[in-house]
Image (cartoon, helix red, strand yellow):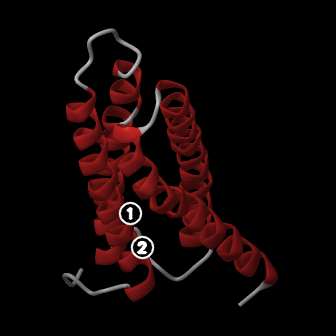
Amino acid sequence: MDILYRILLYIHVSSAILSVGPFFILIPIVNKLGTAHPGVQQAYIGIFRTSVRLVKHAGHVLVGSGILLIVNSHWAWTTSWIVATLAVMGGSVFFLARAFTPVLRKFDEPGADQHFLIRKLTRSVWIYLFLLMLMLWFMVAKPVLWQV
């Protein structure tokens, strides 16, 4: 394994950690949103927004380094675990764009049903974590889902 590949792999793994890690931190934060005073609640929402932004940028690095890893390896783009990862990633990009920022904006609206929004955020965190962990499993286990 040459040095460039090792550096790319390190960048890829680091960006995967930055893409998944913040969501584990958000689980206790979303649970505290319902009982928090308005000022504290805004701080929690700020942490949420910052975490989502971090995940988006880490995702860009993750995709870029993943492309470079595949180009510099023996893996083909038609390999089943790569196709499956790309399919889940495509869905997760649309999910991320619609699951968090629009819901977080609604907290600022007067008369917003905060309990509904908190349930929606909680559900979205768990769904997104599932998608991220599924992609992580594809990349680590490299399962043969079909033969090409």
Q: Residue furthest bottom?
A: 1
- SS for callout 1: helix
**Quick one: 68 or 136, which is closer to the camera?**
136
Q: Where is residue 46? Give x, y as percent.
A: 56, 33
Q: Where is residue 3? Give x, y as percent.
A: 80, 82
Q: Is residue 38 above or below residue 143?
A: above
Q: Are marks 2 and 1 in contact (CB under 8 Å)?
A: yes
- In the image, taking residue 50 as reference, residue 20 lies left or right, namely left
Q: What's the amino acid at mark 2? A: Leu
The quadrant the C terminus occupies is bottom left
- At a point 57% along the width and 40% down the height, the residue shown is 47
The quadrant the N terminus occupies is bottom right
Q: How many marks?
A: 2
- In the image, taking residue 146 as reference, residue 90 lies left or right, namely right
- SS for callout 2: helix
Spatial distance from mark 2 to mark 1, Cα to Cα? Answer: 6 Å
- At a point 19% along the width and 82% down the height, the residue shown is 146
Q: Residue furthest top?
A: 110
User: Which of the labelled discs sits on residue 132, or is there none?
Assistant: 1
Q: What's the amino acid at mark 1? A: Leu
Residue under numbered circle 2: 136
Q: Where is residue 142? Give x, y as percent.
A: 37, 85
**Quick one: 17 or 64, which is closer to the camera?**
17
